[in-house]
Amino acid sequence: MSVGPSAPRALLGAAAALALGAAATACWAPPAAAGTAAGGDTAFTIRDPRITESSGLAASTAHPGIVYTHNDSGGVPKIYALGPDGRVRAVLTLGGASARDWEGMALGKDERGRPAIYMGDIGDNLGGAWPYVTVYRIPEPARIRSQTIRATAFKIKYADGPRNAETLMVNPRTNRLYIASKLFGGALYEAPKHLRTSGYNVMHKIGKAPAMATDGAFAPDGSTCVIRTYFGARMYAVKPDGSPGKSLRSVSLPFQPQGESITYTADGRYFLAGSEGENQPVYKVSVPGAKSPASPSASAKTAEKTGKDDADQGHRDAGGVRTGLFVALAIAACVGYGLFRRRG
């Protein structure tokens, strides 16, 4: 969690964030058999002691089997390249970058069409403490080895004012960047067609996003995208212009203590979903409608619903009193914090 400009605001913001995290966890079903119930298998487990707050995932299409991840706030500007077994194969240090509150990552291209990794320093736990946030870009290395790569920085502002966000997505067809804000009034923002390194890149709201969005990604073929929360995930169609469109369906994910990352596998057949914490598994969940690597776009046509379409809303445990208490605490903390900021 980042440090704000004043101690009282930082403490109140921290209380709100912790309460929301606790409420999210309380709304899950008990972890027993949750993986099988959600149709997920363990792809690998991140055991490296340097990675304790994995907050983003991106599966490389240039290097088969490689998945990139990073730590959350307060860390160092490093991206870890994981092999199929979850072991670190290389550490990419972003030269000239800082890691104030890294929250998401995505694969895209640079202005010359070369593969690139986008890193989102977009967290703002105090909901407006930072005048702008930053997205960094580095070229995806041709060879997986530890190295320092000079980062290009893009300053980001929102047309309707600062906000907290943890979801960074890049459409592989258009290379356009999207950010989904967090908390209850989630919104989806679109960046300019071409990012610039001078001045600010102003993002405009183009639609709604799920409450408590913690990560998202586009499919490798750009036909669909997914946004996850602490509770589950939701798939969306993609419009002809490349922006996320109508909701297709919810996706149930296995229980995770603090689920903050999701991506598609390189073949588009599965989601990979991870959590912050030590020794956390990354789950592999089938993408609805994606039957083979030759036709991943089939997932864009799977708007058919089976049963209640609410898997992304979480599962209430039997002791509803405890859940209600946490939710009430979260709401009270957020409301109190908002009133405090307006008076300040």
Image: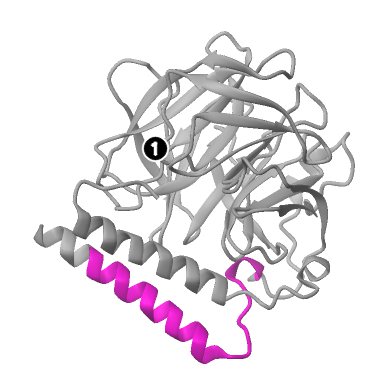
- For the stretch drawn in magenta, the main secondary structure is helix
Residue at position x 47%, y 62% in the image: 211
Q: Quadrant of residue 92?
A: top right
Q: Is residue 259 above or below residue 262?
A: below
Q: Residue 63 location, x and y as percent?
A: 78, 23
Q: From which residue to which does the magenta span run?
A: 311-337
Q: Amino acid at mark 1?
A: Arg
Image location of residue 226, percent across then percent down: 63, 49
Direction front: furthest residue: 49
Magenta residue check for 329 = yes
Residue 306 image offset from top left, x and y in percent? 77, 70
Q: Is residue 171 visible?
A: no
Q: Residues within 10 Å of mark 1 (few under 14, many from 20)?
A: many
30 relative to 229, above or below: below
SS for tag 1? loop
Q: Is residue 317 rendered magenta in the image? A: yes
Task: Please count the marks in the image.
Answer: 1
Q: Which residue is mark 1?
A: 100
Please determine whether, in this image, residue 30 is positioned above or below residue 214: below
Instruction: Please state if 183 lies on the left or on the right of 245 as rendered.
Output: left
Considering every residue shown, the one lying at the far left of the view is 343
